[in-house]
Image (cartoon, helix red, strand yellow):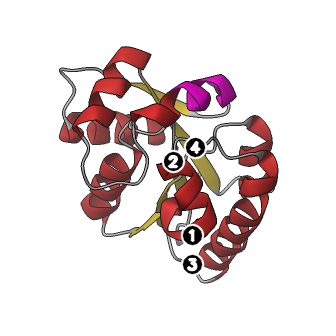
Amino acid sequence: MTQQSIVIVIIGVSGSGKSTIAHALAAAHHWQYVDADDFHSATNKAKIANNEPLTDTDRLPWLQTLRTQIRHWLDTDRTTVLACSALKRSYRELLSDNDPAVKFVYLKGSYAFIAKNLQEREDHFAKEGILKSQFETLEEPSPDEAIWIEIDRDRDVDRVVREINAARSNLTI
């Protein structure tokens, strides 16, 4: 029996390492990697760059586009790792549409650690000024809803990928 494709969504606040981890996980398995930031409108990117939090209204078209993409990847049997903040439960519900082939991995880190990551980041429109609103918006998933990965200073990308793979092997796919 062939394994059905899945979409693994790496979630967390800006600066938690979503893109780095998602890219590494996808590369390790020769899966497709996609960054949800690529689907933001120019208006949303400008707001974020100006440290203006996005509203649910701002996010809705973006989330709907991502949901359409997820459906396409699953329908075309294309296992994908998506880096996406998905800060609220309602966002994750919209993205998954109750499809068990959509799995979430939550990168959990302290405000101080993630703020330091954002201060050091030079190549992204989201900077440290947006972090407070990200933590305020964040509705952490339950351990039943997502694989939790604690991130900290000593954690390297390969180690995080190994932890995700170990946890993923316990999931029903």
Picture residue at 46% right of the left edge, 41% below the top: 168
Q: CA distance from mark 4 to mark 2?
A: 29 Å
- Residue on which disc 1 sits: 42
Q: CA distance from mark 2 to mark 1?
A: 12 Å
Q: CA distance from mark 4 to mark 3?
A: 18 Å
- Using the rendered image of the protein, determine whether residue 23 is visible from the camera's viewpoint: yes
Image-based side of 85 in relation to 160, left or right? right
Q: Is residue 91 above or below residue 74?
A: above
Q: Is residue 60 magenta?
A: no
- Residue on which disc 2 sits: 50
Residue 160: name its quadrant: top left
Helix, strand or loop for disc 4: strand
Picture residue at 21% right of the left edge, 21% below the top: 153
- Using the rendered image of the protein, determine whether residue 7 is visible from the camera's viewpoint: no
Q: Around disc 4, counting alpha carbons within 10 Å, would you say few (fewer than 14), some (14 to 19), or many (20 or more)? A: many
Q: Around disc 2, counting alpha carbons within 10 Å, would you say few (fewer than 14), some (14 to 19), or many (20 or more)? A: some
Residue 125: name its quadrant: bottom left
Q: Around disc 3, counting alpha carbons within 10 Å, would you say few (fewer than 14), some (14 to 19), or many (20 or more)? A: some
Tag 3: residue type?
Answer: Asp
Q: Is residue 53 above or below residue 76?
A: above
Q: Which mark is residue 77?
A: 3
Question: Quadrant where the N terminus lies?
Answer: bottom right
Magenta region, residue range: 132-144
Viewer-nearest of discs 1 and 3? 1
- Residue on which disc 4 sits: 104
Viewer-nearest of discs 2 and 3? 2
| Residue 24, image x, y percentages | 27, 54
Outermost residue, bottom direction?
Answer: 76
Q: CA distance from mark 1 to mark 4?
A: 26 Å
Compare residues 12 and 61 and report the one nearer the observer: 61
| N-terminal-most mark, 2 or 3 | 2
